[in-house]
Amino acid sequence: MAQPLDGKTIILRIELDTQQAAFGQAAGAIEQAGGDLVAIDVIETGRDRTVRDLTVKVNDTAAVPAIKEALGAMPGIRLVNVSDRTFLLHLGGKITVQPKTPIQNRDDLSRVYTPEVARVCQAIHEDPAKAFTLTVKRNTVAVVSDGSAVLGLGNIGPHAAMPVMEGKAMLFKQFADVDAFPLCLDTQDTESIIAAVKAIAPGFGGINLEDIAAPRCFEIEQRLRQELDIPVFHDDQHGTAVVLYAGLLNALKLTGRKLEDAKIVVCGIGAAGTACTKMLLAGGARDIVGVDKEGILTAGKEYAHPMWKWYAENTNPRGISGSLADAVKGADVFIGVSSGKLLKREHIISMAEDPIVFAMANPEPEIRPEEAEDLVAVFATGRSDYPNQINNVLCFPGIFRGALDCRASEINEPMKLAAAEAIAAVIDPEELNRFYIIPSVFNSRVVSEVRRRVIQAALASGAARRTPRE
Ligand SMILES: NC(=O)C1=CN([C@@H]2O[C@H](COP(=O)(O)OP(=O)(O)OC[C@H]3O[C@@H](n4cnc5c(N)ncnc54)[C@H](O)[C@@H]3O)[C@@H](O)[C@H]2O)C=CC1
Ligand SMILES: CC(=O)C(=O)O
Ligand SMILES: [Mg+2]
């Protein structure tokens, strides 16, 4: 599959046979095909051969195939590789492990390692709770995936899931100073995943399950929550639900609606869709209609998906049936956590006046803002390149920061609700507008407020095992 390009800058590595071609010819071909050569790095140079990296700007990504074709047709020039800034950022992975102190001499060595380390091991053996104070467990989260529902890309497997999990680990560190590590498991068997997570749990203070497909994700999370004494949190379910709830509270406020009265359509009844619905129901929503590939989920119908029976019986109070088009007619809110490009302009036109559309599928939303913004009161996506980013990144760093700091045994409903309210409250009422219903992840108040409120909720609900100093 062709790799989509990042923006308008590409890096071409070319090998030139200096007997057959001159560099100026290659540069000319690039310019003629619509590229602007902005930088040249010489990688290797020899008597008959040179290798160069050419940084080329294009106004239109359609110029890229033309540039490749032009270079490919030139005798003496071999196009070794075409890359872009995104791929370059991923070279060798995105994270590393760094010791907190250097080992400069034998004395240091004997303390961090044998023989002195043995005394620390003994202390933990005598009192396992000391693992929280004397090891990285105090600050580590395992980001665990089986690669079965990676973003909206589907079942792409554990190797291909790694870049997302590394990205989550970066976000944990950057926003909340949590040391997270990506663990992509080469199994999609429920029992094997549960066993693997239990086996690695001693080294971690929390488990963030990520991009594990429904319905398997429900059982895995439920069992691990029962069987481990550290927080287990399926981010695609609860992180998404927390942020969606926060964004919706503000969007409803802005459009003068109440959650109890809003007609809400949830499209994609998988991990995220189910959890979003449960949170909305707990918050007081009464009219939610779920739509998946088989159409509207309606009570009385038989579904192979075990969660859909529950879903159909607990939503859709008007008992409607049919397709997505039937579901959205007259609806106030569309929440998409399904797959790209399935919502059309005519769907939005059929919604109630001033509709709210949250097209949260990644990387391609159910509909792009530029196609729909003129029809809606509020529009949000899950992406980082549009305003109103409803993405679980607003939740998981702060919620785990809070949970780790109060050594919570779990992340429970009051803690999730507290996180949602904290996110929504970061935006002052006078700041609230259609392009600002949810704070930016770069707003430092997000993590600190989520942490603060989550700790309060953990202490009040009995999940906390210590009271943090500040
Ligand atoms: N913005 C955010 O923070 C988040 C966004 N997402 C996005 O939501 C989507 C779903 O994620 P998960 O719930 O984890 O996956 P999942 O695999 O558990 O669920 C996806 C559901 O969407 C349904 N679906 C797919 N195509 C559909 C169609 N044409 N019509 C109706 N339903 C359809 C599937 O049948 C499935 O039930 C992905 O695109 C993911 O990237 C997920 C979590 C967080
Ligand atoms: C944001 C996220 O977790 C997802 O799209 O799967
Ligand atoms: Mg995810």
Image (spheres, rainbow, N blue to C red):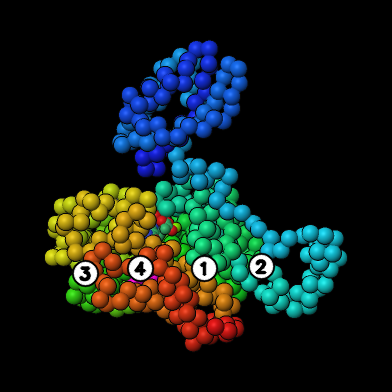
For the residue labelled by badge 4, is the local secondary structure a helix, a strand or a loop? loop
Percent across and percent down for residue 46 are: 61, 21
Determine the CA span between mark 3 and mark 4.
25 Å
Reading the image, the residue beneath label 2 is: 136
Q: Nearer the viewer, residue 215 or 247?
A: 247
Question: Across the whole image, how many numbered discs are drawn on residues?
Answer: 4
Dominant secondary structure of the magenta stretch? Answer: helix
Q: How would you rate the neighbour count of disc 3 (Cα within 10 Å): few for under 14, some for 14-19, many for 20 or more?
A: many
Q: Which comes sooner in the sequence, label 4 or label 1?
A: 1
Q: Which comes sooner in the sequence, label 1 or label 3?
A: 1
> Nearer the viewer's eye, disc 3 or disc 2?
2
Q: Which mark is residue 263?
A: 3
Q: Is residue 116 visible?
A: yes
Q: Please state which amino acid type lies under the numbered disc 3.
A: Lys
Q: Which mark is residue 176?
A: 1
For the residue labelled by badge 2, is the local secondary structure a helix, a strand or a loop? helix
